[in-house]
Amino acid sequence: MNTVIAKNEKYDFFSDKYLNINSCGKLFNTGYKILRKNGRSDYHLLYVKSGRCNAVFDGKEYTLTDGNFVLYYPYQTQEYSFDETGCTTLWIHFSGRASAEILSELNIKPGAYQSRLSDNGTAIFEELIREFHLKHYMHHSAENALLIYLLTLLSRHIHTVQDVSDIERVIMLMNISFDIPYNSEPYAKMCALSQSRFSHKFKEVTGEVPSRYFIKLKMEKARELLKFSNLSVSEIAERVGYDNALYFSRIFKKYIHLSPTEYRTKTK
């Protein structure tokens, strides 16, 4: 395998702009290794769209496949290779006086990440590359916006644990089962958590304890039915899981600050 020792690269610099895309692109790579022993003066993100790349970080070798990536900070040794089967990568070198602050705020540390980034992240990356090369009007602003969004997606990806994706599944289920009484037990089992841990994790993700979140969902659905249907208050109460229309009306007023009848009169 040929080793390309990269040095004196044209776009290796640190910009004093807020953010700056020094260079970026999309390549199909086969049978060679890149080595920057002293790194570069900018940040480098290498993302594997398809195939396999072997990246070395802090002396440890990682095999990166579809959706994996490695991020090098300035002056860190950069070493990665592509075998003969080929690998398609998206890459970017960026700098700017806000770079360190943005990465710190997003809690993105240098390293190799082997869990898979979403297809949405790939699409954002490719749109950034298009903006950079097509140079449309205000392309710098578009590039910076896309870079910040891409880094945000990376941060979410890096720091989203299985608990959170399970909570998202619970939220989706709640949105289609608002007509039943709240019961934390099956939701906690879905997440393989105790009921108390499930409640804590749910609040971390949504800002609400699950029972209150579920009631608010019911009230939002009731508001829709009051505004856009001719169903009676009793029928709407039943649709959102309340056998007792008077109890439903009390809950509705507590959350919406109007009785169901007052709300319907005001919004019709």
Image (spheres, rainbow, N blue to C red):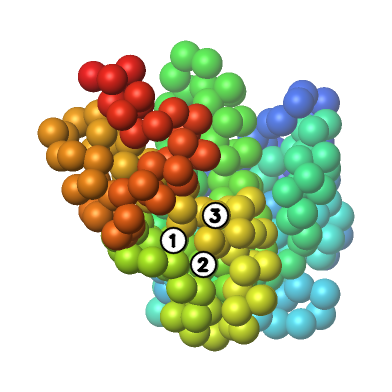
Say few, some or many: other residues with alpha carbon within 10 Å of mark 2 (under 14 / 14 to 19 / 20 or more): many
Vertical arrangement, residue 264 with respect to residue 50, above or below? above
> Circle 3 — which element?
helix
Pointer 3 local density, CA inside 10 Å: few below 14, some 14–19, many at least 20: few
The image quadrant that residue 204 belongs to is bottom right
Mark 1 near mark 3, Cβ–Cβ under 8 Å? Answer: no
**What secondary structure is marked by label 1?**
helix
Q: Which mark is residue 212?
A: 3
Identify the residue at the far left of this view: 230
Residue closest to the eye, 244 or 216: 244
Residue shown at 13% from the left, 33% from the top: 230
The part of the image, by quadrant, that contains residue 163 is bottom right
Rendered view: 150 above or below 137: below
Q: Are marks 1 and 2 in contact (CB under 8 Å)?
A: yes
x, y percent for residue 45: 64, 54
Q: CA distance from mark 1 to mark 2?
A: 6 Å
Q: Position of residue 182 (x, y in %)?
A: 44, 67
Q: Quadrant of the C terminus?
A: top left
* Observer-nearest of 67 and 223: 223
Q: Is residue 240 left or right of residue 31?
A: left
Point out the residue furthest to the top here.
137
Three-letter code for the amino acid on which mark 3 is drawn: Arg
**Pick the front one: 46 or 194:** 194
Placement of the N terminus among the 4 image quadrants: bottom right
For the residues labelled 3 and 2, the Cα–Cα distance comes to: 15 Å
Which residue is at a point 54% across and 62% down the rendered structure image? 210
Residue 167's disc number? 2
Question: Is residue 87 in sight in this rendering?
Answer: no
Q: Residue 171 — which label?
A: 1
| Labelled disc at residue 108 | none
Residue type at mark 2: give it: Ile
